Amino acid sequence: MNGSPPPLILNMKLDVISLILLFPIFIFIFIYCFFFPKSKSTTQIGFKNYPILGTLPEFLLNRHRFLEWSTQVLSHCPTNTAVFRRPGNIHGIITANPANVEYMLKTNFDNYPKGTRFISLLQDFLGRGIFNSDGEAWRAQRKTASYEFNTRSLRNFVMETATVELHTRFIPILETAADLDQVIDFQELLERYSFDNICKVAFNVDPGCLAGDGNSGSEFMAAFEDAATLSSGRFMYAFPGLYKIKKLFNFGSESKLQKSISTVHKFAGHIIASRMEGRAKNPDEDLLSRFMGISEYSPEFLRDVVISFILAGRDTTSSALAWFFWILSSHPKVEQKILDELKTIRLSSGKDRREFYSFDELRQMHYLHAAISEGLRLYPPVPVDTKACLKNDVMPDGTFVGEGWFVTYHTYAMGRMESVWGADCREFRPERWLEEEESGGGKVVYRPENPFKFPVFHGGPRICLGKEMAYTQMKLVAAAIIEKFKVEVVVTAEEKNPPEHVLSLTMRMKDGLRVRVRKR
């Protein structure tokens, strides 16, 4: 449409060089596997390591299904931890052990920063934002953001913004779709809704993406998704430095990545310029204003701040809600329990379905909170997270970690470990999050879980500042939609169950979430 070659052609160009470089390796793998077959009676423990190549052969065969493959491997390890080796001095461990997670995120926090490898791979996209920085740069951003997140005014603003966007834009779209019996992409709607919300809350800017009047916002969203996916794809290269060569010659995925980043930077720069221009006349106290008030922060750094907030506020929430509604469509009993809870809250407040839920009413939704947490446990928006080891260390489970190694905690796998969640770990069972209130009376309430057993919102000093904001928004959206509509997932014979996902910085459904909505 714009004269550039389609993504398929770009990928083919990329694959030609990759195949040339990888051909000798494939020959080696074939010979090795042919002459040294693995005994069928042997149970593999950990990732299979080949001479010289380490885990690379199996990694190449399974990187398209990395989460499932690595989950299966970790489930067979005695402590749910395995060593991972690849050529190019990529050496580290992947763990789904809560004790190890707590050790690296809290107990020995200073020894496990983001690290230079992680930061450099995402530098083009995230710059020096809070998710891609260490040390004093991270602490300064954390301190500035935490002040605003702890204010009641922000909480009230989040409620007001999310509610207005939901009832004036989101629900009318669903009502129209129901009236016309349309099939809609629910994931896309959730992303547009979350994008509008975070822009209003963080920057006091309304892109109007959900309303259909934000052309620049829609272009930005597409570019943002490409930038996130292609940047995270750098971690999956067979040869770690290959992306640098592609970037140098500006071809393949790196060419597309740089174009996407340019669009993202342009949009973020426009937000900063408009806020600087209007700030003198109307000094707002949104999140961006806090950072703009610090004189040493350059426009380029403020741009990184904007991108980080959009990543946190749009991608994670929309991903969580999309997977939640997909799961709920096949669990009618859970859906009915949510409806029963909402009906009870309506009766006790004296409000009808046309009125908005208040913050206090959202806090009463214990079963809905449990159901959303259960969805997050099975389909965490950020399925894996990686740190670097500064000095030789030993994890609580006895695993040695060398200086310069990466250490990845596998949140997706943790939700599927019997050692962590029991024999029913793969079942969607919200009741595991509920308990009877200590005061008695038979009232059942939500019980928070240890953050290192459930590290969906990270843990320790870097625990997510927006955790409560995210739950508030997710409960508000879920309650309003479930109360008014029956969301039916449309599945064709060719589609997989569960849906295929894109392993980006967050876990999105590959082909969206096609649904029909019926009015209740």
Image (spheres, helix red, strand yellow):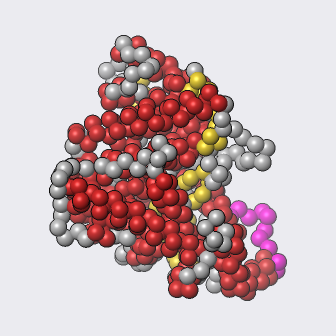
The residue nearer to you, when weighing 270 against 198, is 270
Q: Which residues are magenta?
A: 34-44
The residue nearer to you, when weighing 442 against 21, is 21
Counting from the top left corner in percent of width and height, residue 4 is at 63, 72
The residue nearer to you, when weighing 32 against 182, is 182
Q: Is residue 452 above or below residue 301?
A: above
Q: Is residue 402 above or below residue 367?
A: below
Counting from the top left corner in percent of width and height, residue 365 is at 41, 27
Relative horizontal placement of residue 361, taking residue 180 as reference (left or right): left
* Quadrant hosting residue 124: bottom left
The question of residue 37 being in magenta is answered with yes
Tell me what residue is drawn at x 25 percent, y 50 percent. 286
* Quadrant hosting residue 307: bottom left
Which of the image's four quarters has the N terminus? bottom right
Tell me what residue is drawn at x 41 percent, y 73 percent. 123
Specify the farthest residue to the right.
34
Q: Is residue 97 above or below residue 167?
A: below
Relative horizontal placement of residue 238, taking residue 293 as reference (left or right): right
Tell me what residue is drawn at x 23 percent, y 55 percent. 278
* Quadrant hosting residue 159: top left
Counting from the top left corner in percent of width and height, residue 465 is at 32, 50
Which of the image's four quarters has the C terminus? top right
Tell me what residue is drawn at x 29 percent, y 62 percent. 273
Relative horizontal placement of residue 304, taking residue 244 as reference (left or right): left
The count of marks equals 0
Is residue 405 visible in the rendered image? The answer is yes
Is residue 92 visible in the rendered image? The answer is no
What kind of secondary structure does the magenta stretch mostly adopt?
loop
The question of residue 410 being in magenta is answered with no
Counting from the top left corner in percent of width and height, residue 44 is at 68, 64
